[in-house]
Image (tube, rainbow, N blue to C red):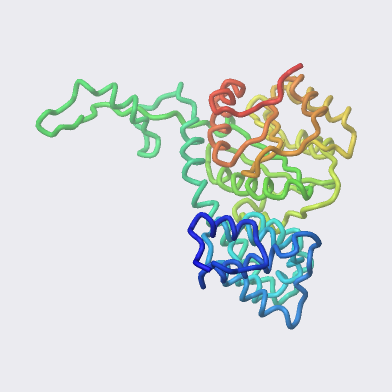
Amino acid sequence: MAELDERQKRWRLLLGGDSQTGLGKDDIQLDNLLNALYQDGSEPRSAGLGASAPKVSRWLGDIRKRFPANVVRVLQKDAFERLNMRAMLLQPEMLAGVEADIHLVATLISLKHLVPAQSRDTARQLVKKLVDELLQRLRSKTEQALRGSLNRAARRNRPLPGDIDWGRTIRANLKHYQPDYKSIIPERLIGYGRKKPQNLKEVLLCVDQSGSMATSVIYASIFAAVMASIPALKTQLVVFDTAVVDLTEQLADPVEVLFGVQLGGGTDINRAVTYCQQRIGNPRATSLILITDLYEGGDAKALVARIAELKNNGVQVITLLALNDDGAPSYDPHLAQAFANLGVPTFACTPDKFPDLMATALNGGDIGLWAAKEEVVMQRQG
């Protein structure tokens, strides 16, 4: 039989099948890799340990060679669920053979207490690799957005290089344009005003670390570490399930922060918000970012009353139902509605939008208008 055309091959590889007739040598290799994961399509199978480890290791290596990185991450995630590969990750050679991926790292963090001594260094290296990738992706935009949110009402005519407001400086010096040099020679520099220490903006990230919020915890930890490096902000990070853990002191090392997270367990949001309320020094200068799916295992009525109290005291409260790229989150619609009725912006946010959200919040901007501009779906008052 003649070889299938490109369109037919794609459909055959997508749908699977017993016969490999019409597939070329490379396509058969791809088909075998996919069959190892998706064959049968019903009951999950176990990858096991011991003698099967080299086979799984080769499979992990082969998919990295044969598929692009974004597909590799999908296959890895499916393998964890279908092939019971969590146990395999506890071996150093397995950890060294996988791509750094946010879902993988979330799985690894949830298993960290089970990781044997011989795998811990490899596990930390894998987490560090993902952290470094996320910092590289998100740091520049976050710092630019937040530094730009410094109070522009207080201007300086002798600013430091990093504080120069180039837009206003250029407009103020247009009359000094030099045709011979095709450039403006500024006679007066205009800079952003620096906040005095007692007037620093405060950001408190309060993050649900229950299992369903795993990727949100990772992104929140990265953003907290970046914000903690900005002198004009006082940043705190608190994570919670039924207990509350303050990770603020570890923010200089995001890897250490993630290893301080314990994914899984129940949820007591009211207890966490109570703790955060005690950590707020200047309510009118504080933004409390509550990141949770709002499935409250504690006292929901007391939680709503406490959020109302925080708002009445001048705290800017924002609830993110998720901070990830995973799509529409699952959340408690009744508690979300109760928050929205208090005037608390309640919505899911992707990591790429978070820096602009924080800049808007720190400037005292209208979060509703920002959400409409960014086409973010917010819980409406009703």
> Which percent across, then down, holds residue 14?
61, 56
List the single residue furthest toward the front: 1
Which residue appears farthest toward the bottom when viewing the image? 51
Q: Residue 187 lies in what quarter of the image?
A: top left
Query: In x, y percent, where is residue 326?
Result: 65, 44
| 250 versus 364 height, above or below | below
Nearer to the camera, 306 or 123: 123
Q: Which residue is pictured at 66% across the width and 24% down the height?
A: 284
Task: Name the residue: 78% across, 67% down.
Answer: 45
- The correct choice, above or below, for 352 with respect to 303 in the image is below
Q: Is residue 194 left or right of residue 292?
A: left
Residue 258 picture location, percent across and down: 68, 55
Give the side of residue 264 with respect to residue 52, left or right. Answer: right
Q: Nearer the viewer, residue 187 or 315?
A: 315
In the orientation shown, which residue stands out farthest toward the left?
A: 180
**Quarter containing the C terminus:** top right
Position of 193 with respect to 185 (left or right) is: right
Q: How many numbered badges does the structure rendering display? A: 0
Task: Please give left or right for residue 227 compared with residue 179 in the image.
Answer: right
Vertical position of residue 339 compared to residue 34: above or below: above
